[in-house]
Amino acid sequence: MSSATLFDKDEMLDILDAYPTHPDIIADTIYDNTRWSIVHELIFKRDDKCYRTYYRVGATEHQEERPWDYDDAVKCTEVKPVERTVTVYEAVDFE
């Protein structure tokens, strides 16, 4: 079972505000969405370790939701890269 590490919210916002050029960000992908929010999965590195956390932003210009709006600290889980093989299907070209 993995344990959570807490990071300062302001430090995390600084990292996120510098995306995509911040060297600590490995990936920032859309993970899910709700009627009012878009949920992102953020993978970043810190002190030779990788961490994952999630944040939400408003889905439209009328939803004023910023990442970790109601948190003082950001809960992150340590992760490691794992290589996987994926099978995809492509169209067959007929001549």
Image: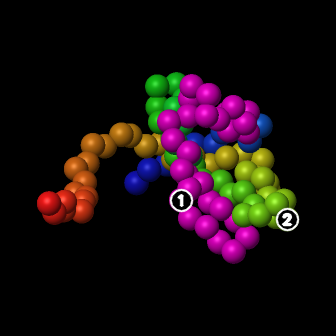
Provide the secondary structure element on which disc 1 rests. strand
Q: Position of residue 70 (x, y in %)?
A: 79, 56
Q: How many marks?
A: 2
Sort mark 2 into few (<14), some (14-19) or many (20+) by Cα contacts within 10 Å. few
Residue 36 falls inside the magenta stretch: yes
Of label 2 and label 1, which has the lower sequence position? 1
Q: Quadrant of residue 44?
A: top right
Q: Nearer the viewer, residue 58 or 5?
A: 58
Q: Nearer the viewer, residue 76 or 59?
A: 59
Q: Magenta region: which residues?
A: 13-41
Q: Marks 2 and 1, Cα distance to the nearest angstrom?
A: 21 Å
Provide the secondary structure element on which disc 2 rests. loop
Question: Residue at the spot x=14%, y=60% of the render?
Answer: 95
Question: Residue at the spot x=36%, y=40% of the render?
Answer: 81
Instruction: List the residue tagged with mark 1.
Output: 31
The residue mark sitting in front, 2 or 1, is 2
Question: Residue at the spot x=56%, y=64% of the render?
Answer: 32
Task: Name the amino acid type tagged 2.
Answer: His
Residue 10, disc: none
